[in-house]
Amino acid sequence: MPKVHSWWRRKKIYHRDAVILSVLSSACLLAGELADQDIGIIYRNYIAPVVGDPALLLWTVTLTVLVFTTYFGGILVLLGGINFLWGRGSRGRFFAGLGTGISSLSLLRLIAYVTLTQGKPLMAFSGYAASLSGIGLLLGFGSYLLMHEYSIMLKKHAKSAWRQWRRSRRPANRRRTRSLAGRG
């Protein structure tokens, strides 16, 4: 029979796995976008010519941010892993989920583009699944799920600790009457 680990050992194991998956996801998402090297071209062609007009510059920068959603998704997944490592589980889960969701917008963008150009949306999945961005998206989703399992485990432990504390605070006569009432 396998040895049952304490809740603290399980906490550390889930903790480490979720952070590792988060860092790997972030690395894959960022490397998938860095392979294109479009930032310099977009800056020269679209942002630099409108530096004199503040309203048009703000609009152009906003559109540029939307173009590079996978960069920001990778950064948010990394922030989620760091927050989770520091013990801020709910904030870490929020950032990991937000980063994964933002990165999935690149998949939707690719599906829309392939549907418009080739008419077959399934062609987008074959190319995206083999790319670094696709692998990073799957790892980010896995990291989010591990963080979720970890938080459920902590809630269960906190609930049992709370019950145990409340039982120890009950008056002795109340515990005895309850146990006698159950015997019938």
Image (cartoon, rainbow, N blue to C red):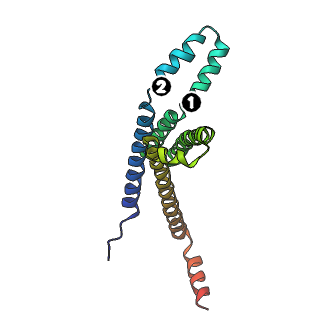
Quadrant hosting residue 32: top left
**Residue 175 in view in this figure:** yes
Please tell me whether mark 2 sits on a helix, a strand or a loop: loop
Q: Amino acid at mark 2?
A: Asp
Residue 3 location (% of width, % of height):
32, 71
Q: What label sits on residue 38 in the rendered view?
A: 2
Q: What label sits on residue 176 in the rendered view?
A: none
Q: Is residue 25 above or below residue 53?
A: below
Q: Is residue 151 above or below residue 118?
A: below
Q: Amino acid at mark 1?
A: Val
Q: Looking at this rendering, what residue extends furthest in the top direction?
A: 52
Q: Is 51 left, or right, of 127 in this rendering?
A: right
Q: Is 97 in front, or is 160?
A: 97
Residue at which label 1 appears: 67
Residue 102 location (% of width, % of height):
56, 40
Asked if the residue at tag 2 contacts the one at tag 1, i.e. Cβ–Cβ closer than 8 Å, the answer is yes
**Residue 87 in view in this figure:** no
Please tell me whether mark 1 sits on a helix, a strand or a loop: helix
Query: Which residue is at a point 32% across and 77% down the rendered structure image?
Result: 1
Q: Is 131 in front, or is 84?
A: 131
Residue 38 location (% of width, % of height):
47, 25
Query: Which residue is at a point 56% across and 43% down the rendered structure image?
Result: 101
Task: Count the numbered circles shown.
Answer: 2
Quadrant hosting residue 30: top left
Circle 1 crowding by C-alpha within 10 Å: few under 14, some 14–19, many from 20: some
Q: Looking at this rendering, what residue extends furthest in the right direction?
A: 55
Quadrant into which the C terminus falls: bottom right
Query: Which residue is at a point 44% across and 26% down the rendered structure image?
Result: 37
Circle 2 crowding by C-alpha within 10 Å: few under 14, some 14–19, many from 20: few
